[in-house]
Image (cartoon, coloured by chain):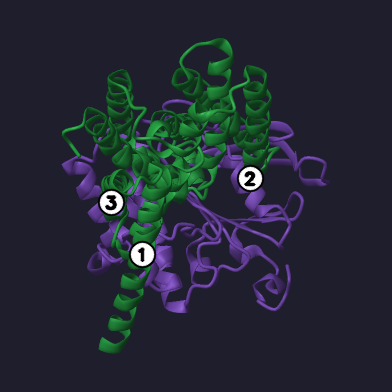
Chain colours: A green, B purple
Amino acid sequence: MLELEFMRLAFAVGIVVGVLAPTVGFFLVERRQSLVGDGLGHVAFAGVAAGYLLGISPVLTALCFAVVGAFAIEWLRSRGGTSGDQALALVFYTGIALGIVLISSANRFDVGLFQFLFGSILTVTPGDLWVVLVLGGLALAAVALLYRGLVAVVLDEEGSRVAGAPVALLNTVVAVLAALTVGISMRIVGILLIAALMVLPVIAAQRVAWSLRSTLALSAAIGLLAVLVGLSVSYYADFPPGGTIVLVAAGVVVLATAAGAARGIGKHSGA
Amino acid sequence: MPVAPDLPAVELDGVSFAYRGGPPVLDEVTLRVEQGAFLGIAGPNGGGKTTLLRLALGLERPTTGRVRLFGAPPGARGLPRIGYVSQRAQLASATPVTVREVVGAGRLAVRGPFGPLRADDRAAVARAIERAGLADRSDAPLRTLSGGMQQRAFIARALAAEPTLLALDEPTTGVDAESQESLAALLAGLRDELGVTILYVSHEFGAVEHVVSRLVLVRGGIVFDGDPHDLPALWHDPSHAH
């Protein structure tokens, strides 16, 4: 399968997405914002529709819309007048409603739209690969640079604020990273399922990890495994890649939960 | 950054506060806490003692009045380091965080959010863990420890900042008598050896009472301010709701 250029491109993008999505998702899950990726996916859908309507790159417009959506969620949440889930619901439903209106105006309820919604291994272009490599690399570098600050805020937001940390900035960084992840992952995984790749590997890792650092490392490894296995199965079985990747990740959650439970039973019986 | 010793650590001047749309929680509170003091803040539930602490730390904004920490507004650049243990501090996370990771987060106040911890940071984290009596548990997942030991880990996180001001909100809630004794010894050591100013909110002080140098009783305002021994005997009766 790797003799085909579109598969090489899909795997190259998939490797970045497989590592990046759970790495960013780790901070969302730890902040109990697991559904933020879902909300941003729906905003990205409006961005794709806007791209079609304006005749410019849907990937670019989706990225821009997702970033604006991320700022909106964080702004609404941090103002304190709106709870996190209400802020998410507001952005989530506004995004999908806007998307439906725009896509209808553009008259583009077609296969191209479905590829963005559900993912496709046929649509990755060399240009997409460069965008993913640059933005994905920047996002991973930002996580590496700010890891300690991001973790401190996750563990104790008020304590970090009292300590003088730029908490608002760090929260905004997480929101923008989530938006970037949605934007660059939608080609492969699809807008509707990208949030699952951000969250499921982290849930699986939590079941078997022994520290924060090991949770993050295992999350990235499980995300990468899910993408590589999912893309391969998708190629041979002619399944949509997004659904296949997420089903693999869900299978890992089941296995990790069983492994975690067995370890717990082992500890109890050994005590 | 060195601080002029005559500056009060905490200063509230005519501070009132109400949550949005709610009745006033605190009314016209004026309080000055000198550096090196061990201030106990007591009062009934809903009396405003936690709100008073949160106002002092800049976590809430007063409706009227003025708050200063070491002569500057809370959150100002260059303030001395502040350690904070919040009420019912706990991990919301399902992730197995180790004691060392929790305590390491306290170095944010010293090192900022960028880059990894350095050798001196790791040494400070180890000292804080040891001071809190958790040296043999430093790599254990926090969720495997008892409530009292978890509380000590959160206190160690505040200590890792090597704070000039340490603020604790109900740190002994649900903690056994032995842990209260060790906390009292720990806090007395911080004040006596390092000159740390301590703000300690509690509805019941238990073993910590004998190391508190000054007590304020809060019920919508400050209704007592002085030496704990000058309080009416009634207050010391645990069955009495202040």
Which mark, by number, is residue A213? 3
Q: Which residue is mark 2?
A: A85
Q: Are marks 1 and 2 in contact (CB under 8 Å)?
A: no
Q: Earlier in the sequence, mark 1 or mark 3?
A: 1
The part of the image, by quadrant, that contains residue A4 is top left
The structure residue drawn at horizontal position 65% and vertical position 47%, both measured from the top left corner, is B52
Q: Amino acid at mark 1?
A: Arg
Q: Secondary structure at mark 1?
A: helix
Q: Amino acid at mark 2?
A: Asp
Q: Give residue A176's position: percent from left, percent from top.
A: 46, 29
Position of A33 with respect to A180 (left or right) is right
Q: Which residue is mark 1?
A: A207
State which quarter of the image contains the N terminus of chain A.
Answer: top left
Residue B53 visible in the picture: yes
State the separation of the CA atoms marked 1 and 2.
25 Å
State the separation of the CA atoms marked 1 and 3.
14 Å
The structure residue drawn at horizontal position 58% and vertical position 37%, both measured from the top left corner, is B58
